[in-house]
Image (spheres, rainbow, N blue to C red):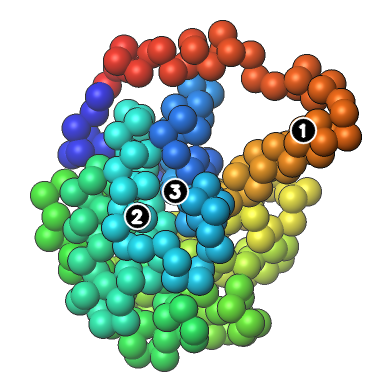
Amino acid sequence: MRTQAEKGARFRALHARPGIILLPNPWDAGTARLLESLGFEALATTSLGMSNALGRVDGDGSVSRAELLENCRAIAGATSLPVNADLENGYADDPKEAATILRDAATVGIAGGSIEDWSGERVYDFNHAVERVAAGVEMARSLDAPFTFTARAENLIRGRNDLDDTIRRLQAFEKAGADVLYAPGLRDLATIRTVVAEIGKPLNLVMSAGDPDLTVEQLEAAGVKRVSVGGALSRLALAAFMKGARAMKAGSFAWMRETAPTLELKKVFGKTSERKA
């Protein structure tokens, strides 16, 4: 298993090299190991996927800071890959208090993480949002191992369809020192290209909000550096679960033909102690 420093350095190196980074989003240790077995180079947590697994609503405050960090610990500990964490808004409005979640995430094995400019009720005022990013940068730079800090501009998924303000925030977050910029809600190539042209740091795109007909090749050509999928893989898994359960309720077990073979799962999960750094 790689050390925390090795994971942090590896994640930094992925951002420095040419080409796009694919960040699928596991929601527990098992899904993290399955994704690692497919050859992905890094992973990202998902607040929606975690909330789904807990039977709660994402974003309503019902998942505690401690529960989020425990989910981070489980995922980071299950894989030799660097993991980027969705750290919500840091569970605090105050810049320095919110930034402490970066330290705590690193302590449980996370190599990078994002903090939102969203309070849970409103998008933070511009200056306050920038102060929060600056505090996050300061915290990330103070850690013993490399930590890749992502600053999120939430406008487009919070009812504020203001691309100019979103770009203004991303530019300010970049100036404040964020390593990666992220504006959930970007959907089409033209808008993505517009944003990329206005910033100088890597852009993370979440495809759960993007046009699903877009390809990795198109996104890379548009200048996207990282692609994640948020809770989409969790929703896909739950869709299959519900499809099978509904069929069972109706009296059919034909869905069993579509399940993952037990031997295949044992092959992945049985290598837990054999994983190489």
Q: Secondary structure at mark 1?
A: helix
Instruction: Give me the residue at 65% from left, 47% from top.
Output: 235
Q: Look at the image and tell me in which quarter the C terminus lies.
A: top left
229 up-or-down from 35: above or below: below
Q: Nearer the viewer, residue 79 or 145?
A: 79
Q: What residue does disc 1 label?
A: 244
Mark 2 and mark 1 residues within 8 Å of each other at the beta carbon? no
4 up-or-down from 196: above or below: above
**Cα gap from disc 3 to disc 2, whole angstroms:** 13 Å
User: Which mark is on residue 183?
Assistant: none
- Which amino acid, mark 2? Glu
**Cα gap from disc 2 to disc 1, whole angstroms:** 29 Å
- Which amino acid, mark 1? Gly
Q: Nearer the viewer, residue 215 or 238?
A: 238
The x, y position of residue 220, in whole percent, is 59, 47
User: Which mark is on residue 67?
Assistant: 2
The x, y position of residue 250, in whole percent, is 88, 34
Is 89 on the left or on the right of 267, as rendered?
A: left
Which quadrant would residue 184 be assigned to in this image? bottom right
76 up-or-down from 61: above or below: above
Instruction: Give me the residue at 27% from left, 72% from top.
Output: 98
**Cα gap from disc 3 to disc 1, whole angstroms:** 26 Å
Q: Nearer the viewer, residue 236 or 245?
A: 245
Q: What residue does disc 3 label?
A: 45
